[in-house]
Amino acid sequence: MADEAKAKGNAAFSSGDFNTAIKHFTEAINLSPTNHVLYSNRSAAYASLHQYEAALSDAKKTVDLKPDWSKGYSRLGAAHVGLHQYQDAVSAYKKGLEIDPNNEALKSGLADAQSAATASASRARVAPPPNPFADAFQGPEMWAKLTADPTTRVYLQQPDFVKAMQDVQRNPSKLNEYLKDQRVMQALGVLLNVKFKTQGGGDDMEIPEADSPPPPPPSQPAKEEAKKPQPEPEPEPMEIMEEEKEKRQKKEKALKEKEGGNAAYKRKDFETAIQHYTKAMELDDEDISYITNRAAVYLEMGKYEECIKDCDKAVERGRELRSDFKMIARALTRKGTALVKMAKCSTDYELAIETFQKALTEHRNPDTLKKLNDAEKAKKELEQQEYFDPKIADEEREKGNECFKQQKFPEAVKHYTESLKRNPKDPKAYSNRAACYTKLGALPEGLKDAEKCIELDPTFSKGYTRKGAIQFFMKEYDKALETYQEGLKHDPNNQELLDGVRRCVEQINKASRGDLSPDELKERQAKAMQDPEIQNILSDPVMRQVLIDFQENPKAAQEHMKNPMVMHKIQKLVTAGIVQIR
């Protein structure tokens, strides 16, 4: 998660969206607070926005976490330069060069810092010439004039313009840096009561020279215009900046509350964790992670109703803020988990399953997918338990028996299936349905029911007769023989099993004697070649040599016949019609 947030921050930084970059780097830092690279990256983003105090704080944190990393000192030096702390910047760059003497960025930064320090010292010794525009930017009347003018009043809603005017107000010599900005020129004209003309671009503006005479007095219409009542001044831009500052401080406090909540959650102090998360929610309502974290605490405490309310609130607020889809999915998954905990019957799982499915449409998370599968499985098991009724199951089985006697096999299958829904542990119902499937020619389905019958009751001889009969019809005589013989272990005198053994032996001996017709032989061989066991025997190099010896070397063949395993495989091939003994 931290790497993903860092990647988003890098992408935003590369595109020049520094505010978004700071947001993502902050998210990454919350997830990995000891990663020095994250603080370094955020410091660069703050510096790009000229927020040098914040840049300096992150740079110091970078150096604290990784004192032997040269780039940290580069960030530290850049922040000091931005704050005009040139000697501190020089010290930072020199410390970085002690670690990495060949770092070009540090060398260049040091040279710039030293030059700036020298220039600053010179300016301190020699008083600068008076600036003819300095008085125009002094005092609160500057903002009043800009607010009164309908054109510049609009500019005051633009943060970059406000910042430019604040820079010039603090240091009028910086005016030259902003002369290409047409808005600044318009503001200068308002402050000097001079109307500047433009001819298609900012480079052609007529700017009074520093030593030019003062502007002529305004014309009479201008005086009349000045006499008009001025509109009520709007709040000064400084108020907006204060609001932003206060908002940022609240976000920082909210993050600290979240950290306190996380620590309390880890030590199982849930009440304290809830207090921290609630406080964080009050300070910052633009981060739904505080809500989902509180929901997680409620989930651990078994307060499922409160958990669900928080999850719904997080989803609603997250959609309003267009939050990360993963955060929405997390809230939905947490809600689904609470609903599963509250489920008492199969229908209670329906809303939980629907909630997990919604979460997966937001983000396909393996953990959510597992929770969905578990909920569906639990719902199915509860449905079976709720539907369980042995008495009705017996009644349905009897109805199936009547239909079977009347040779209404599809109707019989329907009744046997209903009987199994009512009592899925009844081997007789499986045995009877297997008989119906056999009559209908649905041999794979019948075989599956016969095997389930044997699984439920290994001593029930009917299961073996059903399975053996199906295998016989499928012309798998060796498998059918094994099934009948297994059944005789539990019921040695069962006539159906004995008859089954006899029929299988006749078919196997028929193949051994070579009494099969060409078509029968071809059909049996084709079917045998689909059997994985036959394929393994024929691909075994040892068995291939045995078969050759049976044809060419009678003495070696006699030795092979002494090996029970080899003879079993030979018998398998004979039964399948692959090998014939004459």
Image (spheres, helix red, strand yellow):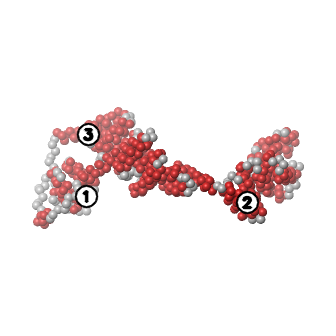
The residue pinned by badge 2 equals 398
Looking at the rendered structure, the kind of residue marked 1 is Tyr
Tell me if 194 is positioned left or right of 309 in this view: left
Residue 413 at x, y percent in the picture: 71, 61
Q: Are marks 2 and 1 in contact (CB under 8 Å)?
A: no
Q: Is residue 46 found left or right of 352 in the rendered image?
A: left
Q: Is residue 274 above or below residue 473?
A: above
Which label lies toward us, 3 or 1?
A: 1
Tell me, yes or no, if residue 399 can be seen here: yes
Identify the amino acid type marked 3: Gln
Q: Which mark is residue 155?
A: 1
- Looking at marks 3 and 1 on the same chain, the residue that comes earlier in the sequence is marked by 3
Q: Nearer the viewer, residue 25 or 431?
A: 431
Q: Look at the picture and state if 268 lies above or below 151.
A: above
Residue 249 image point, x, y percent: 31, 46
Q: Tell me the SS state at disc 1.
A: helix
Distance from Cα at disc 3 to Cα at disc 1 = 32 Å
Q: Closer to us: mark 2 or mark 3? A: 2
What is the x, y in percent for residue 274? 41, 45
Q: CA distance from mark 2 to mark 1?
A: 89 Å
Say whether disc 2 or disc 3 marks the residue closer to the N-terminus: 3
Q: As rendered, which of 509 and 191 lies closer to the eye? A: 509
Type of the residue with mark 2: Glu
Residue in view at x 44 percent, y 45 percent: 2
Marks 3/1 in contact by CB < 8 Å: the verdict is: no
